[in-house]
Image (cartoon, rainbow, N blue to C red):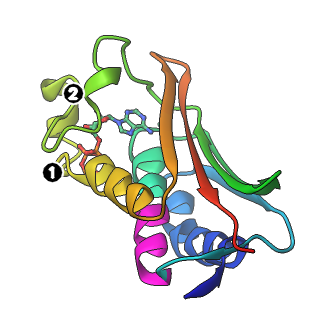
Amino acid sequence: RAVQLDRIVQDSVGKMQMLAEVKEIILNAETEASVPMTGDEERLHQLLTALLDNAIKYTPEGGVVRVGCRKLAHTAVLEIEDTGIGIAAEHLPHVFDRFYRADKARTRQEGGTGLGLAIAKWIVDRHGGKLRVESKLGVGTRVVVTLPLSG
Ligand code: ATP
């Protein structure tokens, strides 16, 4: 149950690197050396995978996805930022709803179920954390997750 979030981040980013390369997206991770927390390693992997999958999926070729993991006071801060298509302000409040997909015509070709963010939020809730999405249409999206540090 004691996990290092920075390791989980590096591991997940490593696994997604191939997908990013194929899409000619630069995927960078900047992690602080030790970000200890109490949690479910498998679920936290799943969280990273869902968020990275979205960032890569909704970012066109030549884009950049940046992942950061650091400590701030008593919290771990995880950020996933992309230079992708972004989310319109009117869709933003609904992206955590199950099966919700912004602009259905656009996203249909990308596959997906609309469950990714609902699952991500569920995992963050279960760890006593918070998740928020900031986005600007045509500019990019930033997902910020804060989770309690252990100790
Ligand atoms: P999946 O279950 O495969 O992740 P999905 O991507 O459609 O399918 P969610 O991850 O729940 O479902 O995301 C909900 C909607 O939010 C998406 O359909 C998409 O419109 C929008 N969205 C999520 N992440 C991003 C992102 N990084 N950039 C742009 N739009 C996003």
Q: Main secondary structure of the magenta part?
A: helix
Label annotation for residue 81:
none
Q: Quadrant of the C terminus?
A: bottom right
Give SS at disc 2: helix
In magenta stretch: residue 44: yes
**In the image, what residue occupies the spot 71% across and 55% down?**
75
Q: Is residue 51 shown above or below 33?
A: above
| Residue at the limit of the structure toward the right, as seen here | 33
Look at the numbered disc 1 and say if its residue's Cβ is closer than 8 Å to ligand 1.
yes
Label annotation for residue 106:
2
Residue type marked 2: Arg
Seen from the viewer's position, the closer of residues 52 and 123 is 123
Q: Which residue is mark 1?
A: 113
Seen from the viewer's position, the closer of residues 101 and 15 is 101
Q: Position of residue 150 (x, y in %)?
A: 69, 73
**In the image, what residue occupies the spot 80% across and 57% down?**
71
The magenta segment? 41-49
Q: Position of residue 54 (x, y in %)?
A: 40, 48
In magenta stretch: residue 97: no
Look at the numbered disc 2 and say if its residue's Cβ is closer than 8 Å to ligand 1.
yes
The earlier-in-sequence mark between 1 and 2 is 2
Q: Quadrant of residue 103?
A: top left
Give SS at disc 1: loop
Q: Is residue 11 shown above or below 9?
A: below
**In the image, what residue occupies the spot 54% across and 27% down?**
140
Please rate how many residues cluster around mark 1, counting C-alpha atoms within 10 Å: few if below 14, some from 14 to 19, many from 20. few
Seen from the viewer's position, the closer of residues 62 and 5 is 5
Instruction: Judge left or right: residue 59 versus residue 32.
Output: left
Disc 1 and disc 2 in contact, CB within 8 angstroms: no
Q: Position of residue 126 (x, y in %)?
A: 39, 63
| Ligand 1 quadrant in view | top left
